[in-house]
Amino acid sequence: MNTKKTSFQTVLDSLLDTGKDFPRRYLQYFSDIGPLELKTLLDVWSRVKPDRKLSLLKGLKASADNDTLVNYDDFARAILHDPDASVRVQAIRLLDECEDTHLIPAFIELLKNDPNAGVRAQAAAALGLFVDLGELEEIAEEAYGEVHAALLESAQGADEAKVRRNALEALGWSSNPNVVALIESAFEGSIDWKVSALTAMGRSADDRWEDRVLRSLLDDNVKIRKAAVQSAGMLALKSARLPLLRMLESEEDGDVMTAVIWSLSQIGGEDVQTYLETLLDQAEDEDLIEFLEDALDNLAFTEDLERFDLLAFNPDDLEALDDIDEDDEEDEGEK
């Protein structure tokens, strides 16, 4: 990745030169960074201005979100304990899709002991990935247990509300019965707690939350409405289809409207494709057009999955057929 015409020293010089904007084309030099280049970077890192660091990290995050081929994990790991709390937050965000369980102890340490609440909150959010992986049995049971215990302790503790809310949201992926009570309690709290509860509900794959989610679609508060819309999509609630279709015609908030479109693509069903195609025909903004095209692609994927589920082979059905055949043979024998 780094065998380019421009030397890495040129990239570092540009990073240190606050008189000019850092060229976006240099971001790729931080992907899959080699050990020698990383050491050279860290040697000058303390000389980089704080705002320059943040600008770089936000640029790397945007790059990672738009290009699945880049990987900035090694660099992000190296600055997890940067003296600047804002840098630590951005470093954690840059690792939000990294499934390496070696990160678990570092994230738990930051969650429990970092002096900055923003860092603790971001660490709680990052641990949500490992809750999801733990539920899927894709990481060791012991590692999952450590993650779950740390988040549960945080959610039930006395830390700042944002930290506890992020811990609750991360636990949304969990099937542990103790989490249900936490979500129910949070739903009865303030607006922010209700939003976190709805977020956790959406991650739970549990239909018990259906009524609460549906009622929240009608809430006067924009944040609650958006969280409910997103949860309805994640839970693929068929009962939310009609309310969401109605929201396409009545919703005034742009962020909620975007969430409605995507959630409908996750739910699928009658009329959804027609509505989305109509919106696409009427759209003029290029970003909206691209988003609607992505939503239609996701809708096609959703409906393909549903067709696959309908056709899925069930071993129990075969056993039932065998039982019927055996009964028929016995009847023939009696005759």
Image (cartoon, grey):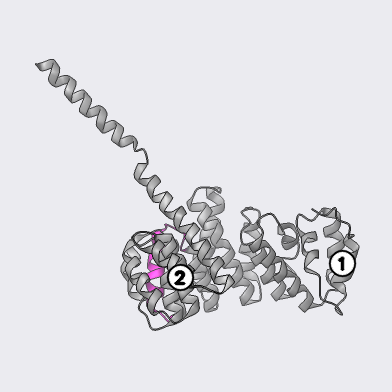
Percent across and percent down for residue 288 are 54, 71
Is residue 26 toward the left or the right of residue 71 in the image?
right
Can you tell which quarter of the image residue 121 is in? Answer: bottom right
Say which element carries label 1.
Answer: helix
The residue carrying mark 1 is 12
Disc 2 residue type?
Leu
In the picture as drawn, the residue positioned furthest to the front comes out as 281
Q: For residue 20: magenta?
A: no
The residue carrying mark 2 is 279
x 90%, y 63%: residue:
9
x 49%, y 67%: residue:
169
Is residue 155 toward the left or the right of residue 24 in the image?
left
For the residues labelled 1 and 2, the Cα–Cα distance comes to 46 Å
x 14%, y 18%: residue:
332
Residue 276 versus residue 156: which sits nearer the camera?
A: 276
Q: Is residue 197 visible?
A: no
Percent across and percent down for residue 152 are 49, 65
Assign the magenta stretch its main secondary structure: helix
Residue 46 versus residue 333: which sits nearer the camera?
A: 333
Is residue 329 toward the left or the right of residue 25 in the image?
left
Disc 1 residue type?
Leu
Q: Nearer the viewer, mark 1 or mark 2?
A: 2
x 76%, y 54%: residue:
32
Percent across and percent down for residue 172 are 46, 63
Q: Number of numbered discs present?
A: 2
Q: For residue 184: magenta?
A: yes
> Mark 1 and 2 residues: CB-CB less than 8 Å, in contact?
no
